[in-house]
Amino acid sequence: MKPEQLVRPEILALKAYPVPSADGMVKLDAMENPYTLPEELRRELAAVLARVEVNRYPAPSPQKLREAIARRMAVPKGMEVLLGNGSDELIQMLIMALARPGAAMMFPSPTFVMYAMGATFNGMKAIPVPLREDFSFDADAFIARMGKENPALVFIAYPNNPTGVVYPEEDLVRVIKACKGLVVLDEAYHVFAGKSFLPRLVDFDNLVVIRTVSKLGLAGIRLGYLVGRPEWVAQLDKVRPPYNVSVLTQAAALFMLERLDVLEEQAARIRDERAVLGKGLSALAQVRVFPSEANFFLIRVADADRTYEALKKQNVLVRNLNPGIKNCLRVTVGTPDENRILLAALREAL
Ligand code: PMP
């Protein structure tokens, strides 16, 4: 039997999410925190994980972890926390729950690819609305389009990936007020931007915020969280796979939430390094750097495919966004050493 005869055509038409091997490379393609945990903390964490009962299923709706997140992340009173296996899973759950027949999803474009992918998986119509040439947000155009399409779901990454741009708060408030569907603000990069709609959740009944611990330095444990009103969380929780957050993830997250200062200090170092790398990139005549409030930069070069390959030959892995975003590469802010290697390799490659 041929899978092609049975698999849905829209799935057959997809390409799998590309994750190239990074063995032996300077890995600047996935917006990870480049710093590992201090040695002593690693030992303590190992001891904590050693005590976890891996023979048991995880708590189905881990209350302790949800409460710890609410406390440490200043979740407003009255709001609830829903956990996902990465925020990727929360995105899927949101779409699955809202994909009524004929329902549409809207998002400014370019943005994180998993919104559109999730729409395809769940048979929802995806409507990308172009950002301006400089990747700023045209709120008027977006609101006008919402009036026509009446989306059930709007995704806005705040700051945006892969551009690093944070849209003005007033623009987003206008979108939320004008939207008759649910607005999801994806704050995956909030630690680098210092801006958040979490405190404003109480002002709107059609807003939820999703976040992840991935960019904070825990990408490997796969944990995302959604914050919203209890009535939204109650519905979304129905599509959550049971036991979606492993016992090891729960234990590691609880441990690290008590030691957030370590990760926040690393994030502060990344923000400092962002300024240094930004200057270094801007100094390259053949590179256009877009300003970023995240832990990466979008850069435009004359020939992104060639530059990407030339960097790869020098063992530097970045993300090539060409042809989707013409001649653009996305580079993650790494350690000072990694950033120096990147700049040297770029000079060589251009
Ligand atoms: N949202 C945005 C905007 C992202 O860039 C990413 C990851 N690149 C995610 C969500 C997913 O993050 P994770 O699944 O690791 O929590």
Image (spheres, grey):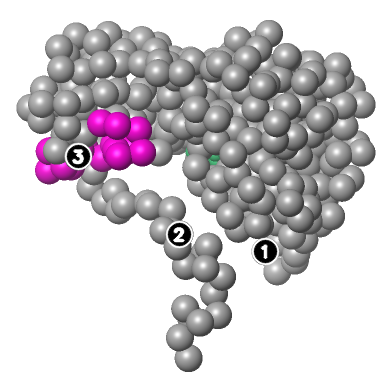
Q: Nearer the viewer, residue 94 or 233?
A: 94
State the mark number for residue 305. 3
Q: Is residue 254 magenta?
A: no
Residue 143 on image: x %, y % = 68, 21
Q: Quadrant of residue 247?
A: bottom right
Q: Are marks 1 and 3 in contact (CB under 8 Å)?
A: no
Query: What residue span does the magenta drawing correspond to?
Result: 308-327
**First in sequence: mark 1 vs mark 2:** 2
At x 69%, y 43%, the residue is 104
**First in sequence: mark 1 vs mark 3:** 1
Amino acid at dot 3:
Asp
SS type, badge 3: helix
Task: Find disc 2 in the rendering and name its residue.
Answer: 14
Task: Find disc 1 in the rendering and name its residue.
Answer: 54
Amino acid at dot 1:
Val
At x 81%, y 30%, the residue is 180
Look at discs 1 and 3 and give the one toward the viewer. Answer: 3
> Alpha-carbon distance for marks 1 and 3?
45 Å
Residue 315 seen: no
